[in-house]
Image (cartoon, rainbow, N blue to C red):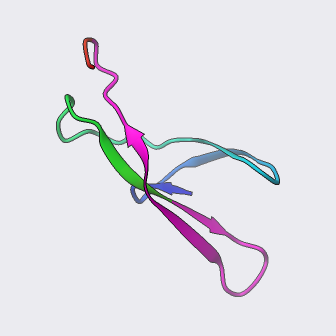
Amino acid sequence: MTFGGAQATVLTVTDDAITVRTPVHPLANPLNSETVDVAVTVNAGLPIQQAVTFANSYTYRSSAVGSP
């Protein structure tokens, strides 16, 4: 699973949910949020992996004090 192309740390996987720790994403401007694509790749033991990308589906926000 990737967020904006950066690999996430997968914590748990169930039949209906994936829990991850999102990768660090430095904001170009800490005052503005940035939305990225999320890609999930499934390896079902087949020669070809299946992947799906959710466009603009995760938003990074500043953790700076005083941010909106």
Q: Quadrant of residue 20?
A: top right
Q: Residue furthest right?
A: 15
| Magenta stretch encompasses residue 56 | yes
In this picture, which residue range is highlighted in magenta? 39-65
52 or 41, which is in the foreground? Answer: 52
Q: Is residue 23 left or right of residue 61?
A: right
Tell which residue pokes out farthest to the top in this image.
Answer: 66
Taking depth in this image into account, of 46 and 39 the one nearest to the observer is: 39
Residue 24 is one of the magenta-drawn residues: no
State the image coordinates of residue 32 (x, y, percent, origin top left).
22, 34
- Vertical relation: 24 (above or below) 37: above
Q: Position of residue 39 (x, y in %)?
A: 52, 62
x and y, in percent, of residue 21 in the image: 56, 39
Q: Is residue 34 left or right of residue 23?
A: left
Q: Is residue 26 above or below residue 67?
A: below
Image quarter for residue 15? bottom right
x, y percent for residue 6: 43, 55
- Image quarter where the N terminus lies is bottom right
Q: Residue at x 17, y 36 (%)?
A: 29
Total count of labels? 0
**Residue at the spot x=53%, y=49% of the render?**
8
Farthest bottom residue? 47
Q: Which residue is pictured at 41% across the width and 60% down the height?
A: 5
- Which quadrant, please, contains the C terminus? top left
The quarter holding residue 60 reads top left
Residue at figure coordinates x 29%, y 39% from the top left:
26
